[in-house]
């Protein structure tokens, strides 16, 4: 299975989300069942996306974060049942932007993954090292810490996204060998069957070679997923790769 997840971060509008959802769904209508696309707009637009998708659409929807609690006095919070109610079946957790700017910790990510599973959502758990950690050769150590307690979440069904922090939104990417090695390491810790996506400056020009890496089961795409033409090009490349 190849997963292509579009992480829109804090971008979009009703109009853009609706037209993108419709066009992506049309593109996916003839796609083989071995390719899965997951559209993750800001939570406020999930309902817009759901309405724009035809019945039985091959495009799944995902949130970009959820609270660890199902409800309560948490101003501004969005819970997993709310995401589910709005049409999501996935949720991105532990994205490095949240780890960096909102001080999200590994244990919070684990609790959020529990909340996701409790409410029928599949977590997409992001891990990856910073530039300083990469330069010091600490990628494996960092991954070991982030993965240490993820066993239960993986057993219940989760995707992992390997996203080196220094590759996100920068146009820089690790070498193909480095991506393969990091993915192999993640699988050696979590089990060989866990689907591991790569994220960080994926674009139409490099997605083909990244999807060719045997340990890569898809991509989590930020900036290059925002325009439907660019997403179309990446879906077309994934379609050519066919079965995996
Ligand atoms: P990018 O972001 O593709 O813009 O580098 C990826 C991500 O943050 O998920």
Image: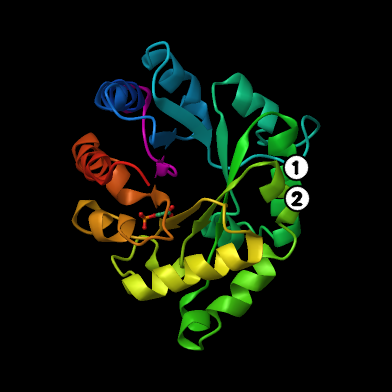
Q: Where is residue 226 in the image (x, y as percent from the top left)?
A: 30, 41
Disc 2 or 1, which lies upstream in sequence?
Answer: 1
Q: Which quarter of the rendering shows the N terminus? A: top left
Name which residue lies at 61% across and 74% down.
Answer: 142
Secondary structure beneath dot 2 equals helix
Confirm or deny contact between disc 2 and disc 1 (CB under 8 A): yes
Q: Give the range drawn in magenta.
A: 1-16
Q: Position of residue 26 (x, y in %)?
A: 26, 21
Q: Quadrant of ligand 1?
A: bottom left
Is any atom of residue 166 visible in this view?
A: no
Pointer 2 local density, CA inside 10 Å: few below 14, some 14–19, many at least 20: few
Q: Mark 1 points at which residue?
A: 114
Q: Position of residue 72 (x, y in %)?
A: 81, 31
Asked if the stretch drawn in magenta spans residue 11, the answer is yes
Asked if the stretch drawn in magenta spans residue 61, the answer is no
Name which residue lies at 48% across and 29% down.
Answer: 61
Give residue 213's mark.
Answer: none
Pointer 1 local density, CA inside 10 Å: few below 14, some 14–19, many at least 20: many
Secondary structure beneath dot 1 equals helix
Q: Mark 2 points at which residue?
A: 152
């Amino acid at each position: 299975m190849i997963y292509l997840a579009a992480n829109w971060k804090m971008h979009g509008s009703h109009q853009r989300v609706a037209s993108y959802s419709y066009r992506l769904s049309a593109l996916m209508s003839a796609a083989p069942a071995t390719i899965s696309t997951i559209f993750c707009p800001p939570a406020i637009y999930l309902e817009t996306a759901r309405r724009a998708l035809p019945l039985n659409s091959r495009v799944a929807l995902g949130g970009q974060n959820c609270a660890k609690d199902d409800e309560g006095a948490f101003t501004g919070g969005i819970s997993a049942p709310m995401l589910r109610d709005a049409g999501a079946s996935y949720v991105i957790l532990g994205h490095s932007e949240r780890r960096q700017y909102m001080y999200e910790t590994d244990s919070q990510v684990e609790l959020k993954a529990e909340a996701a599973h409790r409410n029928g959502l599949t977590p997409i758990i992001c891990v990856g090292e910073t530039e300083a950690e990469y330069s010091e050769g600490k990628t494996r150590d960092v991954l070991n810490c982030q993965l240490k307690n993820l066993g239960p979440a993986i057993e219940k069904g989760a995707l992992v996204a390997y996203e080196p922090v220094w590759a996100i939104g920068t146009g820089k990417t690790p070498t193909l060998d480095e991506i393969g090695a990091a993915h192999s390491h993640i699988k050696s810790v979590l089990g060989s069957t866990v689907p591991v996506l790569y994220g960080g400056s994926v674009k139409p020009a490099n997605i083909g070679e990244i999807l060719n890496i045997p340990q890569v089961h898809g991509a989590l795409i930020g900036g290059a997923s925002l325009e439907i033409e660019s997403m179309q090009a990446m879906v077309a490349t994934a379609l050519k790769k066919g079965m995996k």
